Amino acid sequence: MKNTIKGAIVVAASIITIIVYVSLFLFIKFGLITVDNFFSPINIIWFLFLIIISYIIFSFLSKEITRPINKLIRNMRGLLDGRVIESKKIKEDVKFVEIDRLMDRYLSMLELIKRNNLDLNSQQSKTEIILEQMADGVIAFSITKDIVHMNLSAKELLGIDERFNTFEKIMIKLGIEVDFTQIMYLPKQKSETCRLTTEDTVLNIAFRPFFNSGDIPVGVIMVIRDITEREKLDNMRKEFVANVSHELKTPLTSIKGYSETMMMSDDLPKETAHEFLSVIYKEANRMDKLVHDLLQLSKFDYGKASIKMDNFTISELAKNVIAKMQFTASQKEHTLTGHFSSGIKVYADKASIEQVLVNIISNSIKYTPDGGKIDLYIEEKEDSVEIREIDNGMGIPEKDLKLIFERFYRVDKARSRQMGGTGLGLSIVKEIIASNDGKIDIKSEVDKGTEIIINLQKAK
Ligand SMILES: Nc1ncnc2c1ncn2[C@@H]1O[C@H](COP(=O)(O)OP(=O)(O)OP(=O)(O)O)[C@@H](O)[C@H]1O
Ligand SMILES: [Mg+2]
């Protein structure tokens, strides 16, 4: 049972009063105190003794009151210094109800602060994690142009470290001129952007002010975004449109020219008319092939290509393809030979694999000088079936090899176009092999020949 401070003071005062009262009574009774000897040395000593007793009683009482309060002050100081404190202990040996209540209030306030602090900390670490994980670079500058935060992506994208700790240093390093004050006073939601192009990256940099709770600008945020891929895709798209238009325009111009000439002249000799018509037919075919190829590629792009995976005998398919292409090969006096045992099975889409074989063999026929040698090998490997198509043709220069599977890419544009090529054959082959979960590789040497290696899944 704890006492109240008021109660304790009343008790102490009562005790002192009783002592004084009783001692006065005894002193008077035994004649020690009379009006004459009231200030005698013995009485003064006695009164001093009474004062000491009162002092002892009150100092004991005040110690009991102030000890827990001092403990509380120390605890609060610790809290302000950010130290972790064992708050439960402050309630030990509290003897008064009021102080006990004060401690209870303090402890519950402490709990609340701790909880809020925890929330704040987790919020802060969450923000920090997000900033660190961001692919975009983020740098925050204070009003004094010093860096207050810089994430890893910013360092990587700009190729800088902690030594670049001010706005100026970074701008000098990047070689861009931006007016910090002007950004500071940009309206909310507005930003200033610039583009930084280096040898192999394109960066988009945005600057905008950030504000305190009173909507006063307190710094500048710089966001760096790597737009190299986007830029590349954008260029590819533009290039693609330009290529398609160009590829369509060439045959269209001839078709238009020849048909116009035919319409204008009434007495065109039959042979010339036939010649013109065959050109028109050839060019129309070319356009037809181009549109067909583009549609096929677009189906792969949108995941709409019909790929029906199944087990089938690749050696039989290859035998048929070779037989079908023998005639075209013989027109250029090539020898086209298959080297494989019968019964080799794969798990793939038969129709598209047939197209792959036709595309690569027709390339070899086209790009090998007359009288060349084209061989098709099929072998069962440990975990796949390997197809190797080898010719001894003109080959592909090393610098072109890595681009050969790109759409419209041709080593010699004029020559290939003359042969009726649009540069889409190998890109279709690549898409087909990828959608059959296979692999494709190419090796080539100028004037020696080309080898295409394809790996398909074994039959299941
Ligand atoms: N076997 C090969 N030997 C030498 N060069 C080749 C060979 N195969 C392909 N190439 C080169 O690669 C380019 C791209 O081939 P791809 O099959 O994609 O297009 P294409 O044959 O020009 O046209 P398409 O196949 O659409 O009719 C060709 O233009 C050619 O320059
Ligand atoms: Mg081709």
Image (cartoon, rainbow, N blue to C red):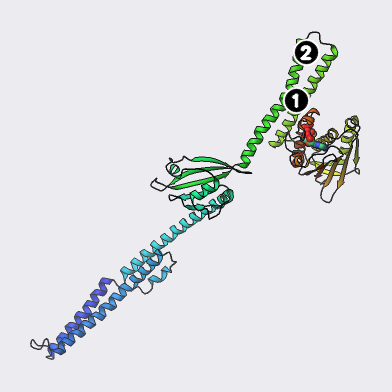
Q: Is residue 249 above or below residue 259?
A: below
Q: Amino acid at mark 1?
A: Met
Cα separation between marks 1 and 2? 20 Å
- Give the quarter of the image for residue 324: top right
Under circle 1, the secondary element is helix
Which residue is at 51% across, 56% downward? 125
Residue 442, image quadrant: top right
Viewed as shown, does residue 44 lie left or right of 118?
Answer: left
Q: Is residue 238 visible?
A: yes
Looking at this rendering, what residue extends furthest in the left direction? 36
* Mark 1, residue position: 287
Mark 2 element type: helix
Residue drawn at 75 percent across, 31 percent down: 293
Q: Quadrant of residue 37?
A: bottom left
State whether residue 425 appears in this view: no
Residue in the image at 34% along x and 71% along y? 70
Which of the two labelled residues, at mark 1 and mark 2, occupies the earlier sequence position?
2
* Ligand 2, image quadrant it occupies: top right
Q: Mark 2 — residue?
A: 262
Mark 1 surroundings within 10 Å by alpha-carbon count, few (fewer than 14), some (14 through 19), many (20 or more): many
Q: Residue 224, position in %: x, y? A: 55, 45
Disc 1 to disc 2: CB gap under 8 Å: no
Q: Residues within 10 Å of mark 2 (few under 14, many from 20)?
A: some
Amino acid marked by disc 2: Met
> Where is 109 relative to 132, above or below?
below
Q: Is 156 or 293 nearer to us in this picture?
A: 156
Residue located at (19% from left, 80% from top): 17
424 relative position to 211: left or right: right
**x and y percentages locating residue 20 in the rendered image:** 18, 82
Residue 131: x %, y % from top left: 53, 51
Query: Extreme bottom residue here?
Result: 30
